[in-house]
Image: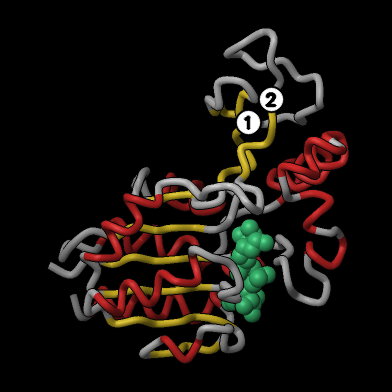
Amino acid sequence: MKNIVILTGAGISAESGLQTFRAADGLWHGHKIDDVATPEAYARDPNLVNEFYNARRRQLSEVKPNEAHLALAKLVKNWHRGEVLIVTQNVDDLHDRAAKEYGVPGHLIHLHGELLKARCTKTNFPTEWHGDILPDTVSPFDKTATLRPHIVWFGEMPFDMDEIYKALLKSSLFLSIGTSGNVHPASSFVEIAKRSGAHTVEFNIEPSVGNSLFDETRIGKATETVPAYVDELLRNE
Ligand code: APR
């Protein structure tokens, strides 16, 4: 059995036209994390926080999955030597759409939530949501409650950590694609995979903060390095 766990970050969506966070023109240079990405920011100014996510949600209709997203979906479809799990830090739906194109739903965890979902502020139930969220948008689960973005803000617990750790502990191959390695717990996944004997590969346009932890590095744009690597894997399967 050769199980594969793949971690992706904003860099895999960059060539689809979505901003990353820490590049010079990144989202965290246009907005302060403390203003738009914490529970305190939402309590203080729900309008500002909602608008930050409304703008990014609206942008999704203008972009599409790129060759890197599609190559990973092709790997999920054609890899028969074990399980493939994609764990994305991204809240866009580009992995989801690539998976749909290859007819392989599932195999995907959104560690930091999803732009196309909203969450009831009382029951915490999530629901598909493609429009804008306003501070007085009524929850479908409780008429006395409103909806918030289904996004993991700083200081909140990421989703599905048990499932992710279980997959890492039985992985033989760990790929990290387009992430700067700045944010926990995602930045620690490579060490857990290594402890389980996995071969670890980083794909980036430049070495990330945690690059020294990886066995192998493929420098280049994700739309070039990822399809090439997937073809290598499937050729040698
Ligand atoms: N191909 C491959 N890698 C790329 C490309 C590309 N075309 N373009 C940029 N990158 C790399 C950058 O070199 C950088 O290492 O993608 C990475 C993006 O890093 P960040 O902007 O820090 O994004 P990410 O690592 O996903 O951030 C993690 O931080 O703010 C939180 O919740 C937010 O999920 C996000 C988390």
* Residue 76 in picture, x, y percent from top left: 31, 58
Instruction: Quadrant for the N terminus, please.
Output: bottom left
User: Is residue 194 rendered to the left or right of residue 114?
Assistant: left
State whether residue 10 appears in this view: no
For the residue with label 2, is its CB less than 8 Å from the closest atom of ligand 1? no
Residue 210 x, y percent position in the rendering:
51, 83
Tell me if mark 1 has few (under 14), some (14-19) or many (20+) residues whose alpha carbon lies within 10 angstroms of its own: many
Q: Are marks 2 and 1 in contact (CB under 8 Å)?
A: yes
Q: Quadrant of the C terminus?
A: bottom left
Tell me what residue is drawn at x 78 percent, y 68 percent.
26
Furthest residue toward top: 143
Say which amino acid is labelled 1. Ala
Q: Most extreme residue toward the left, as rendered? A: 1
Q: What amino acid does circle 2 point to?
A: Leu
Relative to 77, is 48 above or below? above
Which residue is depicted at the point 24% across and 68% down? 171
Residue 13 position within the rendered picture, expressed as x and y whole percent measured from the top left:
61, 63
Q: Which residue is mark 1?
A: 118
Which disc, if any, is residue 147?
Answer: 2
For the residues labelled 2 and 1, the Cα–Cα distance comes to 6 Å
Q: Is residue 144 above or below residue 184?
A: above
CB at disc 1 and ligand 1 closer than 8 Å: no
Q: Can I make out residue 82 in this image?
A: yes
68 or 170, which is in the foreground? Answer: 170
